[in-house]
Image (cartoon, coloured by chain):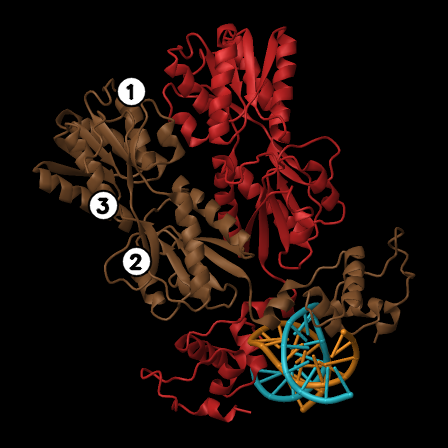
Chain colours: A red, B brown, C orange, D cyan
Amino acid sequence: MDQESAESQQNSDGQEASIPKFAVRTITDLAKLAGVSPGTVSRALAKSDKVNARTRDRIEAIAKEHNFQLNQMASKLRRRQTGIIGAVIPLGHERSQHISDPFFTNLLGHIADALTENGYDLMLRRVIPRREEDWLGKLIGTGLVEGVLVVGQSDQFNQIERIAQDYRPMVVWGNYRAGQRHCVVGVNNERGGFMALDHLVKSGARRIAFMGDSHAVEFAARHSGAGAAAKQHGVGLLNLPTHLSLTRMREEISRHLDQHLASIDGIFAAADQIASEVLRQLLQRGVQVPGQVQLVGFDDLPLADQTTPGLTTIRQNIEYGGHQMVELLLRRLNGEDTESVVMDPVLIVRESTRGQTLSK
Amino acid sequence: MDQESAESQQNSDGQEASIPKFAVRTITDLAKLAGVSPGTVSRALAKSDKVNARTRDRIEAIAKEHNFQLNQMASKLRRRQTGIIGAVIPLGHERSQHISDPFFTNLLGHIADALTENGYDLMLRRVIPRREEDWLGKLIGTGLVEGVLVVGQSDQFNQIERIAQDYRPMVVWGNYRAGQRHCVVGVNNERGGFMALDHLVKSGARRIAFMGDSHAVEFAARHSGAGAAAKQHGVGLLNLPTHLSLTRMREEISRHLDQHLASIDGIFAAADQIASEVLRQLLQRGVQVPGQVQLVGFDDLPLADQTTPGLTTIRQNIEYGGHQMVELLLRRLNGEDTESVVMDPVLIVRESTRGQTLSK
DNA sequence: CTGAAAGCGCTAACAA
DNA sequence: TTGTTAGCGCTTTCAG
């Protein structure tokens, strides 16, 4: 219908006074300008070698001049590849919707970088599993994403496992459980928990409390590992449930300390943020750390090195983990079948314990 | 060609033993099963009222049974709407690629929530402007995103301004400068800086240092506001450049303190993370806070309330800011032309200063 | 209320 | 090396 107006440089509506250049939005527009067919333009822009170098350069020049960019939607549809990876953070174990665990946001940063390096884009989604039943299936089934990275298992182990049965390109950050189906990257939480408690005992603590939220798989594993170590050493382990959201955490810790401070000399906090708040409340109460109570955290976030005294903690290599997740996903996208990666935790001794390094 | 095999339930390849149900991937497959045309299926799935309620229910049932989901790529292409918002964090002022300012990741969380509530998806991209020349244009021009949220201006004010000239659906977190073109949401940094310094002076400090990275627009504004307050009170303001990346920050602060500690009694750190590290190093050196040196931060991150002594700081309402950004973007997507939003900073007095509240 | 038909903008055979 | 053609899977007129 109005193709003939395409060539005309003048604009009769008189709106745009400046440079009435014909807007070149489609590959066909560009083809017309270059005097070639759309197919050739497509090949040129894809830097295909099946096109004359000279024409390619010419087309590229025109494209740049009009700063033309391919319509990704169309391209992706046709090629049946989206180049998009979905990252989803399930918030099942925290009612508070707005919690932002610095560990996860950190991990996400590394994931984003690794994906970008490999030419993929990242679609981020935070979901409250309770509200949306089939949160994973809904993300996957639409054909929008080529693969999925799940950041944290929350309390959704079974749901993830179910999806993994017939969906390959998925990698999960979390805890590995023997015989599981989905490909997971994470630290050996059980072992980390064991090390934390072992270190406390070897540093002289005898009446030790665990603080964390055992509804989340990873925390549960840390608790279980700590329990094993306690048993082995013949000491008890008091379980004091504590959530991650700051406001809840505060009052819970306060209550825990009110009730149990007198009878404990060691605390294993299942996350550094918890440890940091515990430390603060201990100091506020005039308790000596590590003099009266020794304290071990988990994660080795930057903040662990920022408190006074510095926090003894169990390190997870978050950067390595993020890159590992992406690499495994890429392999899976490629048809390979990858094993889970369980990283060894490392004990970092700072000043919140009396400094006995873990004897191997 | 092979349409006739569609109806057949048996699979001659003998691969899948379990439930050889015909895979229904396209709207056309579904249409066949339901005995209607693709168009009707499309309408039914879109819950259009131009379709018989009974047929709609039937189609929905079949869809659920085969858990069919629309191919988003195709749908988006056809409707010329992607439902995707791009969020981009420019990392221009930090060489270190892997910095993850907790303030921004926090903000991002709120943005993600607000977008989800409005049915949009979020595509996240972190860019190093130096490497990619036209980072904003490249994100916008592809038709992949319907709008863009820029999280932090970094040192890219001009680039953003350039794009804003002819691209409407963009909202930026950052500093407002009179007469600027792009729509920005942020706190009045100049004023915040003023308040911080004013508070230090009113609390008795006279020889005050500023620590921050003035290459970033927002920090520069905080510095400038602090300078104005200093001038008004007739005190000096020492500028001690300090970066955000932890390793650099550490040595810089250490050096600053080596050189200037003797001659200062107040520090305004342009971000809470800087303040927190300053505090740590001060305590380590046995300096009394606020006794010998008073300290004010900026942001009011959770960590500001976690240090001992607690950090006096300038609060930005990050949750409100995130929601505001999304709301403005939605309005712009709707054709409205929105003004920038400049929020008032709030002084939060804790223990790192001697506690004089800002006289109004 | 439903079906037929025409594309969204691009890519990939297949010919020339 | 280039042009032509046939769709990717969906939505949306336009008839009926």
Q: Which mark is residue B191?
A: 3
Where is residue B191, by image quadrant? top left
| Marks 3, 1: nearer the viewer | 3
Check disc 3 and report its element: helix, strand or loop: helix
Work out whether disc 3 and disc 1 sit on a shared chain: yes
Side (left or right) of A117 relative to B310? right
Identity, as a three-letter code, of the amino acid under mark 2 = Phe
Which of marks 1 and 2 precedes in the sequence? Answer: 2
Q: Which mark is residue A224?
A: none
Q: CA distance from mark 2 to mark 1?
A: 38 Å
Quick check: can you spot residue A53? Answer: yes
Where's the C terminus of chain B, which quadrant? top left
Tag 3 near tag 2, CB within 8 Å: no
Q: Which residue is mark 2?
A: B157
Q: Which residue is mark 1?
A: B284
Front position in the image: A190 or A284: A284
Side (left or right) of B19 relative to A97? right
Q: Residue at x 51, y 8 (%)?
A: A264
Which of marks 2 and 3 precedes in the sequence? Answer: 2
